[in-house]
Amino acid sequence: MISTLLVANRGEIACRIFRTCGELGIRTVAVHSDPDENALHARVADRCVRLPGATPAETYLRGDLIVKAALAAGADAVHPGYGFLSENAAFARAVLDAGLVWIGPSPEAIEAMASKTRAKALMGLAPLTDVTDADLPVLVKAAAGGGGRGMRIVRRARDLAPALEAARAEAASAFGDGEVFVEPYVERGRHVEVQILADTHGTVWALGTRDCSLQRRHQKVIEEAPAPGLSEDTERELRELAVRAARAVAYTGAGTVEFLLAPDGTAHFLEMNTRLQVEHPVTEAVFGLDLVAEQIRVAEGAALADEPPPARGHAIEARLYAEDPAREWTPQTGTLHRLAVPEGVRLDTGYADGDTIGVHYDPLLAKVTAHAPTRAEALRRLAGALERATVHGPTTNRDLLLRSLRHEEFTHARMDTGFYDRHLTALTRAPADLLAPLAAALADAHGRSRFGGWRNVPSQPQRKRYELDGREHEVEYRHTRAGLAADGVRVVHADAGTVVLEADGVRRRFEVARYGERVHVNGTALTALPRFPDPAPQRVPGSLVAPMPGTVVKVAPGLVTGSRVEAGEPIVWLEAMKMQHALTAPVSGTLTALEVQAGQQVEMGALLAVVEGDRQDEPEGARQ
């Protein structure tokens, strides 16, 4: 029996595994990088071991250090979680060689399936080698790992080489393996997967299907179980293929077999993930199982029942990310002041109130899962919970999640992997709640004297400016003998934390919380802007600045001051939260300054380079 278990991972998945260990009476051991010293997973574990360094390559991808940590902490088992080394056969073998229990499939099964190229060969498939125009569009994918890392869609032959280079770099950084391959890209396909669970006695369970078609940048956003709208024949085919894949490699433990369903219903094998998936909570909800507990029991030698428990109802999960849609979805950092969801839904997170969201790791804040007897009820429950959730801190994708869940294509289960290609712009430009800035201004004005400071005339309108969804909004209010007032609405109540407004006969309550210049009004996040414009000098034209804090992983080869560059040409590659972002020349012209080098850490807004534009790029009025 396992008595002490180390999780070779961090954040949400480490906390989730520790929760099950606590229920089973198993002691827990965490490992942490230097930025994660005070992270939630390090705080909740019974024991903790430091991995010196900050980047994944220095810490969570160092299998040798993790094995030493397990032995030093007295662990007798290791659970890899997902990502990092979870599909690394050498790491699994090192754990076993150290006399520890590995919570996962055998190293041989990982070797056979963890590499997508080897998995395809096992299934009688082969990647594309000589790509021609007739093969386009194609998909470049990392052979190891998942989560959309090292993945690029290529629609033009000339874009293939740079896509391969970028995918290799991103895959090497995320998984320690830079192998990539090319396969056909199926337009308007559905991403459907089958959860499997196998023991050491020859039993393999196929725990239904999941639909993970809503993806942005190849990163899953919303998942559900079972996959809606599949015929009985398709369901049966997918389950049989998944079981066949598991038996082919004598698989044990939890794993997932992924498929792409073409519009005509044809199933294309994608890969087998030899680990627990991020979206496993939806399967747990539908089957009433704890998959982590089952993984541990299988590793201890327990046998599964002949048949899995029956499926009940429908579950949907949404991933809440710290990212800003108004700034091209760049990852966001800062303090998470408050995170809470209503009762009745499941919250999986690696953060607690007051924790810092750093730059080194995935921007996933939390997963919210709803389960109900029907899909429509689960959808309504999840959307309602997200709408009422308290998320105070960096900008998130919550509005995107809400609008996606309520979009007609999703509610009618007509979605595919191109959903966001078609609808992202509309989903991120929905009308903002313009009463939110007014509520913020009224809460801020509460308690101020009508005759103090700059208010020379009590009835003179006062103005406040806020940034909302990347746009500036100015609101006006007045101090009157009866209290605060604003045109077009009735101010029923206003204090520092609560504002009640009545507009067009409808009364609404706004809860207001302020953290410096950041203001949260119900589910709307605002930034209070200064009353007067900042007199500080602006950047010179052609400046390239960091859109987020991160690490410079690469500067374009051969680029020096005086080099000629074209608008849109990559100059610097910045890595933040496990994603690489190519930052391009803002104009065509001459590089007059290059302020960074590979390996350098930069803050958001830091000057990276300056390009002096050609005269034809200048505004007409600037020419002499």
Image: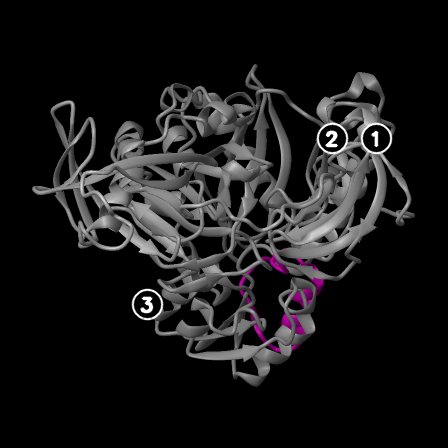
Up-down relation of residue 478 to residue 128 (above or below): below
Which residue corresponds to the image point at 44% horizontal and 37% vertical from the top-left? 223
Residue 85 location in percent, x, y? 63, 60
Label 3 element class: helix
Which residue corresponds to the image point at 70% horizontal and 42% vertical from the top-left? 119
Residue 595 location in percent, x, y? 78, 55
Query: Which residue bears the numbered disc 2?
Result: 183
- Indicate which disc residue 114 carries: none
Whether residue 90 is in magenta: the answer is yes
Q: Nearer the viewer, mark 3 or mark 1?
A: 1
- For marks 2 and 1, give the CA distance: 40 Å
Counting residues from the start of the chain, the first of labels 2 and 3 encountered is 3
Instruction: For residue 313, say whether it is visible.
Output: no
* Nearest to the observer: residue 42 or residue 204: 42
Query: Which residue bears the numbered disc 3?
Result: 23
Q: Quadrant of residue 31?
A: bottom right
Residues at discs 2 and 3 in contact (Cβ within 8 Å): no
Counting residues from the start of the chain, the first of labels 3 and 1 encountered is 3
Task: Point out the stretch of residues depicted in magenta.
Answer: 84-105
- For marks 2 and 3, give the CA distance: 43 Å
Residues at discs 2 and 1 in contact (Cβ within 8 Å): no
Q: Is residue 204 left or right of residue 413?
A: right
Label 2: few (<14), some (14–19) or many (≥20) C-alpha neighbours in 10 Å: some
Task: Check the picture and name the quadrant holding the N terminus.
Answer: bottom left
Residue 10 location in percent, x, y? 52, 64
Given the image, on which type of amino acid does mark 3 rest?
Answer: Glu
Label 1: few (<14), some (14–19) or many (≥20) C-alpha neighbours in 10 Å: few
- For marks 3 and 1, give the CA distance: 66 Å
Up-down relation of residue 545 to residue 79 (above or below): above
Label 1 element class: loop
Given the image, on which type of amino acid does mark 2 rest?
Answer: Glu
Query: Which residue bears the numbered disc 1?
Result: 614
